[in-house]
Amino acid sequence: MGAGLIAAVASQINEYEVAAFSSKAALGLAILIILYVVPQLARSVQWRSEYAVQLPNAGLIFCAVIVMVTIISLSSGNNLLYLVLAVLLATMIVSVIAARLNLKRLTPSVHYPDHIFAGEAIPFEVTLANEKRFLPAFSLSVDLVEERPASKAGAKTTEQKAFALGYFPLVPAQAHARMRIERSFSERGIFPVTGFVVSTGFPFGFVEQRRLVEWRGEIVVYPKPKPLGDFGQLPQFLQGRVESRAKGSGSDLYAIRQYQSSDHHHHIDWKATAKTSRLMVREFTRDDDWRVRITFDSRIDEQAAADPEFNRQFERAITFAASLTTYFTELGAEVRLTTAEEDSGFGISQAHHFAMLRSLAQLSPTVSTDGEAPVHDDEWEQGLEILITSHRKLPSNSPATHVIRFEDLS
């Protein structure tokens, strides 16, 4: 601005060389400020409202043209250039106002399945409602804002990322538009959703305005179960099927007691009858009870945490645990998943199965100085115990029937 004023004064006193140099300097400085300084200032501004303004490349070029015409108009005093400058400024003002009006009273929403597995394409149904009475909405993009783990290695913080849901060219007044897309998640996890970002460049594309619409939710992505044969040579887990401690019509002996009138004569134990001189019958256990406990030890030592291959081994172990829960649930067994954070308890329903998968979805490794695998404090009943761990040292009093280490699954 100072160089432009010097150019204007120099032209009035007939110092044309100074005026020409000052005009060129003002134009060059203005272009540098627009291209390098203004974008950095715009990014550093903390917007307190739900609206934000961003200048795309077309907008930056248009602003550079406005500055150039302004400097030339001031230096030359040509009335025609002032008219051109007025048109350019009016175009920018209309872009800002029209984009702001275009974003008002819009309500986005999204629907997705309750159960999502990593690697599977799942449908997302996006709806954008226009609540304005007369004005339609044009050229709208809707993004879903999710919290993801920070991309920096070793960082435990989260950062917000926007995922494009769809583009709506026109939404009539007091109507809604719906779009269906397919989306897949490459990794497991629980991703909180903080809201939507509705953006538009209407009408000229020189100014892009965005509006943040708060909406709370979460997307739970389960680890994808696989056939157990994909994990190499594993023990025969069917050996874990045991008889319960309740009476039933099984084949194993539960107790021998004195005969009652309601007992069947086929159950009479003649040897016990001969020894006791009283009529004795056999009772059997119920053999349809099958309990499986899966313990996932997420503790690791510092050496394993520094190994670049460990993340792949850990994720494969998570997938293996999810495969085990699915395998035994489909066979009708009572399955229990125990981690450092949660204990699902025994259950056989699909709701219990998805609860175990949710626990695995949010599991992450924790560094521990203890070199041994964990031992359960509670008393373990007879059944199948599977321990999945990265520790090589296993306590002698561990109740685990089978021990699967991370490196065995690679």
Image (cartoon, helix red, strand yellow):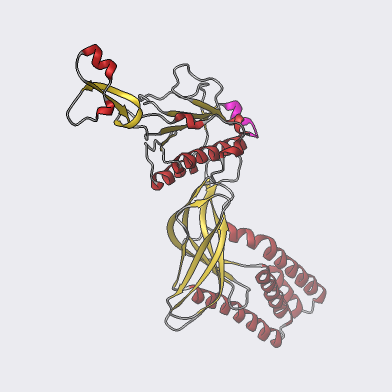
Q: Position of residue 236 (x, y in %)?
A: 53, 30
Q: Where is residue 379 in the image (x, y as percent from the top left)?
A: 35, 24
How many marks overall? 0
Main SS type for the magenta part?
helix
Residue at horizontal 60 percent and vertical 28 percent from the top: 304
Residue at horizontal 51 percent and vertical 62 percent from the top: 124
Q: Which quarter of the picture shows residue 82?
A: bottom right
Q: Nearer the viewer, residue 85 or 223?
A: 223
Q: On the rendered structure, is 189 left or right of 342?
A: right
In the rendered image, residue 215 lying in the magenta stretch gets the answer: no
Q: In this view, does 78 lie above or below 394?
A: below
Residue at horizontal 50 percent and vertical 41 percent from the top: 322
* Image quadrant in which the N terminus is located: bottom right
Residue at horizontal 63 percent and vertical 83 percent from the top: 86
Magenta highlight range: 302-309
In the rendered image, residue 303 lying in the magenta stretch gets the answer: yes
* Image quadrant in which the C terminus is located: top right
Q: Is residue 322 above or below residue 408?
A: below
Task: Determine if residue 154 is in view.
Answer: no
Q: Position of residue 88 (x, y in %)?
A: 65, 80
Q: Nearer the viewer, residue 378 or 174?
A: 378
Q: Nearer the viewer, residue 283 or 339?
A: 283
- Residue furthest out toward the left: 261
Task: Determine if residue 294 is in view.
Answer: yes
Q: On the rendered structure, is 55 left or right of 349?
A: right
